[in-house]
Amino acid sequence: MAKYTEKTVLMDAATVKRAVSRMAYEIVERNKGTENLVIIGIQTKGVSLAKLIAEKIAEIEGICPQMGSLDITFYRDDLTRLSEHPIVAGNDIAFSIEDKKSF
């Protein structure tokens, strides 16, 4: 019979909040503001993180960057281990990425 062990918490809520804040400030600083900035999250967990970062940037700069999502399911090296019939969420980038900076 399998033995279950307690999982280690890598980041608690406060630590995640600080990390997201640092990422948002770094993105704004490296981009020199929000001009031509878009944020694209990779399905599925990356989209949630992208939303948190975009919300923090909006809080910092007063402007929320455009957001999109990208599904890389068929390009994963572990595709065969995911599922016999993987769920594809599709891409959602409803804006031109021409001359944009993405993080």
Image: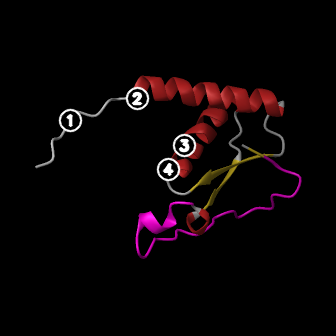
Across and down, in percent, residue 49 comes to: 54, 43
Three-letter amino acid code at disc 2? Leu
Magenta segment includes 88: yes
Q: Which residue does the image show at 69% across and 34% down from the upper left?
A: 62
Q: Which residue is denoted by mark 1 in the rendering?
A: 5
The stretch in magenta equals 77-101
Q: Main secondary structure of the magenta part?
A: loop
- Against 15, residue 76 (above or below) is below
Q: What is the distance, in whole Å, between disc 4 and disc 3 at their CAs?
A: 7 Å
For this orientation, the residue located farthest to the front is: 1
Mark 3: secondary structure: helix
Tell me if 4 is positioned left or right of 22 in this view.
left
Across and down, in percent, residue 29 comes to: 78, 26
Q: Are marks 3 and 2 in contact (CB under 8 Å)?
A: no
Across and down, in percent, residue 63 comes to: 71, 39
Q: What is the distance, in whole Å, between disc 1 and disc 4 at their CAs?
A: 24 Å
